[in-house]
Image (cartoon, rainbow, N blue to C red):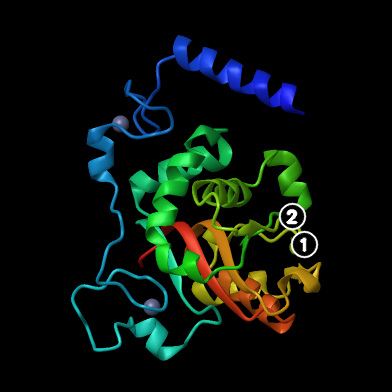
Amino acid sequence: MRIITFFKKSIKILLDMLLPARCMLCGAIIDSSGALCADCFSKIHFIASPICEICGLPLELEENEKQMCARCIHKTPRFKRARAAMVYNDNSKNIVLGFKHADRTESAPVFARWLVRAGEDLLTDADIIIPVPLHYTRLFSRRYNQAALLAKEIAKELNGNNIKVCYNALTRNRRTASQGRFSKSERYKNVSGAFTVKNPKIIAGRSILLVDDVMTTGATFDECSRILLRNGAASVNVLALAKAIN
Ligand SMILES: [Zn+2]
Ligand SMILES: [Zn+2]
């Protein structure tokens, strides 16, 4: 195993020497691999306070004492808190899609650094990180789960903090249609009953941090939280690379 890791690392070093690092968005040559050029970096809307203390939505101003958005005041989600590194807009969408569908997995360590920054408070509370699972048929066609890669790199980034990533606690038991085509209420229906806790012992009494690439309405995270809490998790927080804000 060590020999394989050694060869993999050697090949990567060799490739880094031969091929220049490129910006993950525009392809311009840059210093470090998996990152952005200065121009593209300025086009990304990184989320900073003031934000809704529940769902992490950027707020226009310090809206009220409790710092909650209208949606969370109306209906509190099942997860305790959600945070995201950046707003899901045309630029971040290209980054996320490249990471998800075009094998641009070398960006994962950079994303993990953004996620650790965005989810600082949540990570101090977390016992276990659980990536939102793909259905096995989708995993087969895509070859990797982008959420699992992010979770793995977050744990690496925090190295020594004793947070474990649990890849098999939660499974997706049916192939749900992509959430993009649905209205908000349809999205909740689409993922209802889609997840199962495979190993309740692992999550019992634990504080869970769910990780995924994008949070749109939060329907998927809400459903995962419901099933985790029902199976004995103490609490669920949520961390996403990008968050839709409309
Ligand atoms: Zn660029
Ligand atoms: Zn909110």
Residue kind at label 2, given as amino acid type: His
Residue kind at label 1, given as amino acid type: Arg
Q: Which mark is residue 3?
A: none
Q: CA distance from mark 2 to mark 1?
A: 6 Å
Labels 2 and 1 touching (C-beta < 8 A): yes
Which residue, given by chain and number where applicable, does mark 2 sit on? Answer: 135
Using a 10 Å C-alpha cutoff, classify the residue at mark 1 as few (fewer than 14 neighbours), some (14 to 19) or many (20 or more).
some
The quarter holding residue 175 reads bottom right
Using a 10 Å C-alpha cutoff, classify the residue at mark 2 as few (fewer than 14 neighbours), some (14 to 19) or many (20 or more).
some
The quarter holding residue 189 reads bottom right
In the image, residue 42 sits, relative to residue 84, either above or below, namely: above
Sequence order check, earlier mark of 2 and 1: 2
In the rendered image, the quadrant that contains the C terminus is bottom left
Q: Tell which of 32 and 241 is nearer to you.
A: 32
The residue at 66%/70% (across/down) is 191
Question: In the structure shown, which secondary structural element does the residue marked by tag 1 occupy?
Answer: loop
